[in-house]
Amino acid sequence: MTYKSEENFIRRGGFTLIEILTTIVIIGVLATAAVPIGQLMIIRQQEKLLKEALSDTRRALDQFYEHYRTFPASFMELRGLAPPNFTISYLRDAPPVNPFTGDQYDWVVVTSGVTEYNDFGCYETGCHEFIDHNRRVFQNEADLDTSGNPNPANPLAGKAKCCDSCTGYWGIWDIKYPRDDRLAINETLYKDW
């Protein structure tokens, strides 16, 4: 028996095309399974941050009310940056950053209307509208439309009167998530947290 050469019996190193394609398909399947898990982990982290922000803010509002017997009329008061009356800091970042949007002013403010000037039920308004209203009251600007009636764009206009041209300071009673359609992982609405 004669052997033609040793080269016929030695296999050359490397992978076949089939082996490479099979490996790529397996890696692709594993990667597609990992993406939803990664997204779920990000959403859980954001939900955790949302719960902490809401909890910290509500705790600070309760402490503020317990100390001053009024709800804060601005986020500056919660930060202790409204001298001479409100110098105790209850919340370093007020309002907190919304973890889903990254916007500090993307909240619905539940305003009690309960300050030293008025007292009646709770209403919801956007954070910017709340700040703008209390700025107008501070500057004694009217919250009226062009015909002299309460501004229809402002649902709280005309609810209380501290003077002829304003509706009184609104106090921050609570903050809520701004959108009505976002469901949490546990099937509850973020706005109900």
Image: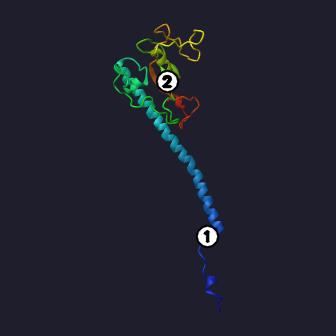
Dot 2: element:
strand
Could you tell me which residue is drawn at 35 percent across and 21 percent down? 83
Rendering coords of residue 114 (x, y %): 44, 15
> Going by the image, does 151 lie left or right of 92?
right
189 or 67: nearer the eye? 67
Q: Please say if 26 is above or below 178.
A: below
Rendering coords of residue 148 (x, y %): 57, 9
185 or 32: nearer the eye? 32
| Residue 35 badge | none
> Going by the image, does 6 lie left or right of 169?
right
- Give the CA distance from mark 1 to mark 2: 63 Å
Could you tell me which residue is drawn at 60 percent across and 9 percent down? 147
How many residues crowd around disc 2 within 10 Å: few (fewer than 14), some, or many (20 or more)? many
How many residues crowd around disc 1 within 10 Å: few (fewer than 14), some, or many (20 or more)? few
| Residue 15 badge | 1
> Going by the image, does 78 lie left or right of 165?
left
61 or 78: nearer the eye? 78
Name the residue tied to disc 2: 109
Looking at the rendered structure, the kind of residue marked 2 is Val
